[in-house]
Image (tube, rainbow, N blue to C red):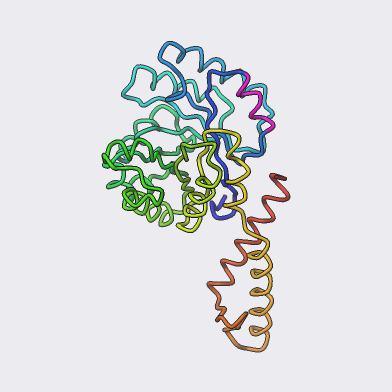
Amino acid sequence: MDPRLRPFRSVLYIPGCKPRALDKARSLAVDAIIFDLEDAVSADEKDNARETLKEALAQGGYDPRVKIVRINGLDTDWGQADAEAVMQMDADVVLLPKVSSADDIDALAAITGDKPIWAMMETPRGMLNAAEIAAHPLLTGMVMGTNDLAKELQVRYRPDRMPLMTGLGLCLLAAKAEGVVIIDGVYNAFKDEEGLAAECEQGRDMGFDGKTLIHPAQIEIANKAFAPTPEEIELARRQIEAFEKVQAEGQGVAVVDGRIVENLHVETAREILAKAAMIESVLGF
């Protein structure tokens, strides 16, 4: 499905080792879930986490949410077993951490076959190779790992995220060029609603499809920020109506609210309405 139409407003990390959290996730108003076998699971729980997650997914109840499993890197002691286990799980996507090149995607695909792959973009080399990663035929999504990227770049935290803008921009360009989903990084201060809202608005303005979240308390803010607003929906309808009217009169340009409306604006308007319809009819939250 076109990533511009399928909503990915909110993408919540859930530890794959915690049955209570896995159960609660079935009732959360999120567009997608990243079931985490990597950072959220300690070394001595890795094997148990695979089995716990496999059982939870087999029980079902997560639809219509997209089910994404983040495995450990293939260069770790657990990555190979994780990748093999995902093939036995009811998962839609496998998410590979610290992707640095398309070769990393090839290595995973050698285990997971034709299952769709998402890439964690969180290293300087990954930023430089974003275009080739996004172009991989099995790659359908990218997730910004802004905490790891900030660590690797040795940057200072700034609310405007200016030190990360080069990396964010490179990945956005790559994702949009190839038509794959791209999700913004997490906001660490989960009790800071104002800060989260501001960062969501920034990400939406930049072109991200949604936000990765670390706590259910962040869901409502992300859903609102990355959904079409009532004003955008109303304007989209008026733009389409005005453009269709001038087309019927043999013209190619309309004017709405003192602004030119051409075919490209109408395409965007139709995408807005389609996404709004998807949120209402398929997700229902």
- 23 or 69, nearer to the observer: 23
> Please, is residue 240 above or below residue 192 in the view?
below
Relative to residue 51, is residue 175 drawn left or right?
left
Q: Is residue 24 magenta?
A: yes
Coordinates of residue 261 in the picture (x, y in percent): 57, 78
Main SS, magenta region, reads helix
> Please, is residue 1 above or below residue 91 in the view?
below
- 233 or 153, nearer to the observer: 153
- 194 or 141, nearer to the observer: 194
Q: Is residue 5 magenta?
A: no
Coordinates of residue 193 in the picture (x, y in percent): 56, 43
Coordinates of residue 81 in the picture (x, y in percent): 42, 18
Q: Residue at x 46, y 23 (%)?
A: 40
Q: Residue at x 59, y 71 (%)?
A: 266
The C terminus lies in quadrant: top right
Coordinates of residue 274 in the picture (x, y in percent): 65, 58
Q: Residue at x 36, y 54 (%)?
A: 169
Relative to residue 46, is residue 150 drawn left or right?
left
Q: Looking at the rendering, which quadrant does residue 67 occupy?
A: top right
Total numbered labels: 0
Q: Magenta residues? A: 20-27
